[in-house]
Structures are given as C-alpha cells and as structure tokens.
Image (cartoon, rainbow, N blue to C red):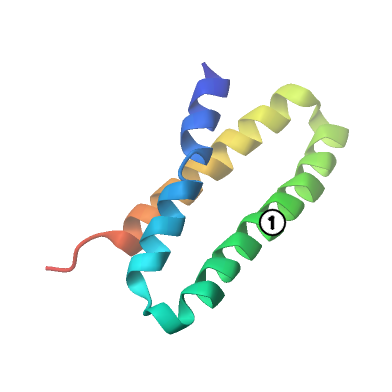
Amino acid sequence: MLFVLIGLATSAQPLLFGMSRQLVDAQTAGKALAAVNLAFFLGAALMQSVTGAVAALAGLPAVLLFMAAMLALGVVIFLAYTAPTP
C-alpha cells in the first residue's frame, strides 16, 4: 500500500511540467521547464542523501516512512501554494 501511495505522489511530475508551461510565455518556457527538471534532480539527490542517513540510523522501514512523510509534506505545500485566492 505504501508503494502505491509513493507512486501516486511521484506521478505528479508530468503535471507540474504542464502547469509550469502555462505560467510562462513562449520565450521563457525552456528556462522554466529546465528549472522544474533541475528541481526534480536536486530533490532526488537530497532525498538520497537524507535517506542514507535515516537507513543507517533506523533501517529500511524508517526510510519508507520518512519518504512517505516527505511526499505528504510536499503535497501539502503544493496545495497551499496552488490554492485559489479568494
């Protein structure tokens, strides 16, 4: 079940590319999409570093719980930033 939730949370990457493309004009679309792509790679590198430390301290189950918690936090932050303004 946890793997399904992680898969659903990480499948948002193509949607974020589309959202980013809609927010910028045609002249800056390449830069915007490159920045989104870079953010994904930097996020993956950071998660690998942190989960290595978590695995050393608490083992694999703790890593999976940590990843699920970070994905849930990312979803909450995303929803907060993209909520319609009244």
Tag 1: Cα neighbours inside 10 Å, few (<14), some, or many (≥20)? Answer: few
In the foreground, 64 or 25: 25
Residue found at x 44% / y 55%: 16
The answer to whether residue 77 of the structure is visible from this angle is no
Image quadrant assignment for residue 77:
bottom left
Q: Residue furthest top?
A: 1
Residue 19 horizontal side relative to residue 83, left or right = right
From this view, report whether residue 33 is shown above or below residue 60. below
Residue 40, given in percent of the width and then of the height, sits at 62, 56
Local secondary structure at mark 1: helix
- Residue 71 placement (x, y as % from top left): 53, 42
The percent coordinates of residue 82 (x first, y second) are 31, 61
Which residue is tagged 1? 41
Q: Residue at x 53, y 73 (%)?
A: 30
Q: In this rendering, is residue 3 above or below 43?
A: above
Question: Which residue lies most toward the left here?
Answer: 86
Q: Residue furthest right?
A: 56
Residue at position x 57%, y 34% in the image:
68
Q: Amino acid at mark 1?
A: Phe
Quadrant of the image containing the C terminus: bottom left
